[in-house]
Image (cartoon, helix red, strand yellow):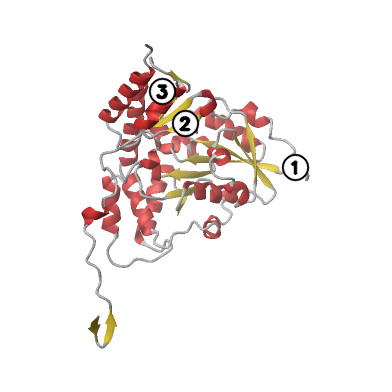
Amino acid sequence: MLSISGIGFAALPQPVRMTDMILHDREARGFASDNYSGIHPEVLTAIADANHGHQGSYGGDVYTRRLGEVFRAHFGDTARVFPVLTGTGANVVALQALCSRWGSVICADSGHIHVDEGGAPEKTAGLKLLPVAAQQGKLTVPAIRAEARGFDDPHRAQPQVVSLAQATELGTVYTPAEIREIAGFAHDHGMYVHLDGSRLANAAAHLGLPLRALTTDAGVDVLSYGGTKNGLLLGEAVVVLNPAVDRGTDRLRKTSMQLASKQRFIAAQFIALLAGDLWRRNATHANAMATRLHRAVRHDVEVVYPVETNAVFARLPEQALARLHDEFPFYDWDTAAGEARWMTSFDTTPEDVDRFAAAVRAHTRRP
């Protein structure tokens, strides 16, 4: 036993070497999800730069104040940003801010809030989702109109929000005109518009437009802005674009368990992403890698949706899928149809794409 001032304690273990903390192949990259990627070096530097001294907690810091300026530069002078921890959390907080307890949300049947959030909008936010058929992942006014009814019927959950995803769950992109048409219909019927923008950067990069052209200028009321898929460690943001609809978003963030104590580190990441053009550089590169993959495999597999962002959806034989799974990580999308989803990221390299495309060709080549 060692002793300090008469207090005994067991000998401490030797410090762990940094090389012992590396548990994976640092050169391995796949096509499963842009969530699989690491942190962009500029974002990592921003975290380290913010990691000195003390700053106020729960948003009472200089980085969060600066973040408000950065978001207003992109989305307009009235935009208010509320950093949160997760994409699901962002959607839950945003939809609660727009809905009454008796409200419902019209969304695409393939939408992330309906398919991939474990029922969180309904279980946690206590609202009803009304999924409608979408064309290649995109809502249309005729589809929305099918559920935009019963506004005064107490037996029906009142439609109060139309929720879009940009880019969609199938990698497709709404044009500003398409969003404006939907927003016009929604507002004419007393509904608000929410945009799930987990890959908004990819959509804006595809169209060559600023972020506000697909949001504020198109009539979106509240945005869930994604950072994790575009190079952040963690962090998303609820952005209230229409101040008239803000029903205590700051309090909803707390009651939904999405208020980070050391919020400066989320804010610092978003500043690194959005104060310059890093968001666009990352998204443009990810999109370009998906386009490269599409061009390389389009004669070997059936590509089932337009490749507009950083996703390629392909249909190929079951045996080919199994062999590819042995070599690369990716997700099956529709197993019954033999469809797979291949995602690219800000750190996907041309060599990664070429190796994967060569494997696709090898496993789908007819004898």
- Residue 156: mark: 1
Residue 65 at x, y percent in the picture? 38, 57
Q: Sort mark 1 into few (<14), some (14-19) or many (20+) by Cα contacts within 10 Å.
A: some
Residue ID for mark 3: 320
Give the label, 3 or 1, closer to the camera.
3
Residue 319 at x, y percent in the picture? 43, 23
Q: Residue furthest bottom?
A: 6
Vertical comparison of 226 with 349: above or below: below
Give the label, 2 or 1, closer to the camera.
2
Q: Nearer the viewer, residue 220 or 268?
A: 268
Q: Earlier in the sequence, mark 3 or mark 1?
A: 1
Q: How far is mark 2 from mark 1, CA to CA?
A: 36 Å
Residue ID for mark 2: 332
Residue type highlighted by circle 3? Ala
For residue 207, say whether it is visible.
Answer: no
For the point 41% across and 50% down, which residue is it?
Answer: 235
Q: Nearer the viewer, residue 191 or 90?
A: 90
